[in-house]
Image: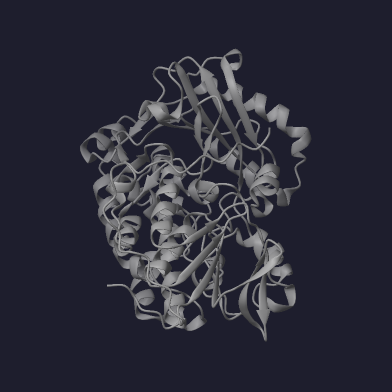
C-alpha cells in the first residue's frame, strides 16, 4: 500500500504554558545532531536544547515518532503503528518539566479501568485493574489461593522497583559499573537463576494467574519462561500505576514532544535520512545527510541499533560491536500486524484485548524455534471504546497484533502473508468478533519483512535486542558509544532497554552524558 501522507502536527490538548525562549546563539554554543525522531531522539533533543545546545534532528520519514507514530488514513481512521498504551508517565512528565513544559497541557492521557481484558482460550476471562480488591476477585475466579498472593506480590515488587530504580537511571559503560553500591544493593532481588514465570510461582500457583502477571514479557518480545525475573516490574507498573491512553493515539505524545522541542529551538528536518556519521581522527564531527556534511560536537543516534550502526559507522571503528557481533546477537520476536478500518461497531469488545492461546507454551516454543504459530495468541486494540478520534462516526479502527518469529529464522513473508492474514482474521472469533471481512473499508498489513524494509527495524525484531542477562546493563550497547568519541546512543536497543518509559529514562541518561562530556550547563 502506498505510504500515507504525513499529517500536520495537531494542536496541544490545551493552551501550553509559556516556555522559555530558545537560548540565543552564542559563538561557543554546542551543536548536536540527533539521528532519528523516535521517542528517545525527541526526548534527548528536548533536554539538550533546554541546556542551550543548537540541536538539529534528522528524520528519514515524513513524520516524527518512529515506531510510536500514529497512522492517519484518508478515510479518517487512525492507528497506532507500534505501542498502543502508556505506562508510568511520571518519567516523561519530569522531562517535560525540565524543559519548562507541562505534559498534561500538551496531550490528554486517559487512565483506563479496566486496563485490558485477558481471555484464556477455552477458559475464564480477567478484567485486569489497578483496584486491588477487584483484581483479587478476578483472580479468585481462577484460584482463591492465588488471590491471596496479590498484595504480597505488589509489596515485593514495590521494593524491587525502589531498589532497581537507581540502576536503571544511570549509564553502564565498563565492567566496574556492575559492582557499584546501588547494583550490589539490588542484586538480592534480581534472582538471576529464575525466569519471570519461576519468580511468579512463589506467589501464584495456577499457570493462568501467572500468565496474567507474566505475559507482559511480550512487551520486550520475550517469553515469560525465559525472560529474567527482574521484569516482574513491568506488570507491577501496570497494577500499581495504571495504564493510560493518549487521546489521538501514542503518536500524539511524539507530536507534543516535537512541538516542545521546536519551541526550544530544535530544528526538525523530516524526509532527511542520515547516510553516515562523519569522523576525523577517530572522533565524530557531524553527520552526512542530503548530500552535505553537517558539523556537530556530538551525534546522538536514535535509529534502530542493529539496522543503523552498520550503516552509519564502518566495521573497523566498532571494536565492541562489530558486524559479526551485531549479527550474532539475540533479538526479540517480531509481529504480524493488521490495521483494519471496519464499517459499523463492535459492541462488547474492550479497549485492549489479549487472547492467550490454550497451549500457550507451545505457542511460545514455536516462536522461539522460528516456526510460525498455527494457533497463535493475539492482541487487539479497539481504542474507540475510549477515544472517538480513532475512527469516523459509525466505524471502528482495529489494531491486530500476532507475535511471530523475527527474520533471523528466514520465513518467506511474501509467500506467507496471505495465509497468515486469513489465520489472524479467523482467530478474532475467539475474542467474540464475528467475520468482518465484508466490513473492511481500510486495511494495511505489516509483516516482519515490512518492519525491516519499510520501518528500518533490524531483522524485523520489533522489540530490539532481547533482554536476557547477557544483553543487559554493561552487556547492552551503552548510551555513550565508547568506540567512537562524540557518538551517543538512545532507544530500545540501548541501555536501559525497550518500552516507552525505559526509553525516556535512557534519553535522560544520554542527554546527561552529552552535557557532562561537552561541559554544558544543566538546567535548574
* Relative height, residue 492 to residue 516 (above, below): above
Can you say whether 339 is above or below 460 in the image? Answer: above
Instruction: Identify the residue at image location x=66%, y=66%.
Output: 309
Residue at 71%, 48% in the rendered image: 407
Kindly indicate the quadrant of the structure image that contains residue 178: bottom left
Q: Position of residue 285 (x, y in %)?
A: 61, 78
Residue 358 appears anywhere in the view:
no
Quarter of the picture containing the N terminus is top right
Q: 239 above or below 97?
A: above
What residue is shown at x 28% (from left), y 47% (from top)? Answer: 105
> Residue 115 or 98: which is nearer the viewer?
98
Residue 400 visible from this viewpoint: yes
Rendered image coloring scheme: one colour
Q: Position of residue 324 (x, y in %)?
A: 74, 68
- In the rendered image, residue 3, in percent from the top left (x then y), is placed at 65, 38
Residue, x 56% and y 51% (percent of image)? Answer: 463
Q: How many marks?
A: 0
Q: Quadrant of the C terminus?
A: bottom left
Q: In the displayed image of the protein, which residue is found farthest to the left? A: 133
Task: Please name whichever residue, 193 or 93, is drawn nearer the observer in this view of the structure.
Answer: 93
Whole-percent x, y for residue 54 in the image: 47, 70
Amino acid at each position: 500500500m502506498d505510504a500515507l501522507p504525513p499529517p500536520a502536527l495537531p494542536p496541544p490538548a490545551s493552551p501550553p504554558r509559556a516556555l522559555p525562549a530558545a537560548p540565543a546563539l552564542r559563538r561557543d554554543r554546542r551543536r548536536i545532531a540527533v539521528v532519528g525522531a523516535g521517542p528517545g531522539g525527541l526526548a534527548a533533543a528536548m533536554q539538550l536544547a533546554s541546556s542551550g545546545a543548537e540541536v538539529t534532528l534528522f528524520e528519514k520519514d515524513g513524520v516524527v515518532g518512529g515506531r510510536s507514530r500514529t497512522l492517519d488514513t484518508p478515510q479518517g481512521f487512525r492507528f497506532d503503528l507500534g505501542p498502543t498504551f502508556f505506562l508510568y508517565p511520571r518519567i516523561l512528565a519530569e522531562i517535560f518539566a525540565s524543559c519548562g513544559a507541562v505534559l498534561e497541557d500538551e496531550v490528554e492521557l486517559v487512565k483506563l479501568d479496566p486496563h485490558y481484558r485477558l481471555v484464556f482460550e477455552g477458559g475464564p476471562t480477567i478484567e485486569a485493574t489497578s483496584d486491588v480488591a477487584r483484581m483479587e476477585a478476578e483472580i479468585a475466579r481462577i484460584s482463591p489461593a492465588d488471590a491471596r498472593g496479590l498484595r504480597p506480590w505488589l509489596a515485593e515488587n514495590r521494593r524491587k522497583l525502589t531498589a532497581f530504580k537507581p540502576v536503571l537511571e544511570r549509564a553502564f559503560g565498563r565492567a566496574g559499573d556492575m559492582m557499584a553500591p546501588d547494583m550490589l544493593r539490588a542484586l538480592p532481588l534480581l534472582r538471576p537463576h529464575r525466569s519471570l514465570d519461576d519468580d511468579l510461582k512463589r506467589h501464584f500457583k495456577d499457570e493462568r494467574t501467572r500468565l496474567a502477571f507474566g505475559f507482559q514479557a511480550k512487551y520486550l518480545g520475550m517469553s515469560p519462561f525465559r525472560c529474567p525475573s527482574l521484569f516482574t516490574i513491568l506488570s507491577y507498573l501496570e497494577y500499581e500505576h495504571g495504564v493510560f491512553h493518549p487521546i489521538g493515539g501514542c503518536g500524539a505524545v511524539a507530536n507534543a514532544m516535537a512541538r516542545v522541542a521546536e519551541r526550544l529551538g530544535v530544528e526538525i528536518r523530516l524526509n532527511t535520512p542520515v547516510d553516515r556519521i562523519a569522523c576525523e581522527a577517530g572522533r565524530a564531527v557531524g553527520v552526512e545527510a542530503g548530500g552535505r556534511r553537517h558539523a556537530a560536537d556530538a551525534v546522538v543516534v536514535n535509529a534502530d541499533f542493529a539496522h543503523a550502526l552498520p550503516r552509519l559507522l564502518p566495521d573497523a571503528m566498532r571494536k565492541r560491536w562489530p558486524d559479526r557481533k551485531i549479527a550474532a546477537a539475540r533479538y526479540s520476536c517480531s509481529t504480524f500486524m493488521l490495521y483494519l478500518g471496519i464499517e459499523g461497531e463492535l459492541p462488547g469488545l474492550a479497549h485492549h484485548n489479549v487472547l492467550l492461546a490454550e497451549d500457550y507454551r507451545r505457542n511460545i516454543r514455536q516462536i522461539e524455534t522460528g516456526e510460525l504459530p498455527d494457533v497463535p495468541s493475539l492482541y487487539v486494540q479497539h481504542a474507540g471504546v475510549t477515544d472517538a478520534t480513532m475512527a469516523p462516526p459509525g466505524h471502528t479502527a482495529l489494531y491486530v497484533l500476532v507475535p511471530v518469529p523475527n527474520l533471523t529464522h528466514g520465513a518467506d513473508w511474501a509467500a506467507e502473508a496471505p495465509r497468515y492474514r486469513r489465520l489472524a482474521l479467523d482467530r478474532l472469533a475467539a475474542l467474540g468478533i464475528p467475520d468482518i471481512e465484508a466490513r473492511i473499508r481500510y486495511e494495511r498489513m505489516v509483516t516482519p519483512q515490512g518492519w525491516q524494509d519499510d520501518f528500518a527495524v533490524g531483522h524485523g525484531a520489533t522489540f530490539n535486542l532481547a533482554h536476557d542477562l547477557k544483553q543487559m546493563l554493561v552487556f547492552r550497547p551503552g548510551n555513550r558509544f565508547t568506540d567512537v568519541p562524540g557518538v551517543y546512543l538512545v532507544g530500545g536497543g540501548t541501555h536501559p532497554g525497550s518500552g516507552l518509559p525505559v526509553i525516556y529514562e535512557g534519553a535522560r541518561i544520554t542527554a546527561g552524558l552529552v552535557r557532562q562530556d561537552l561541559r554544558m550547563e544543566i538546567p535548574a
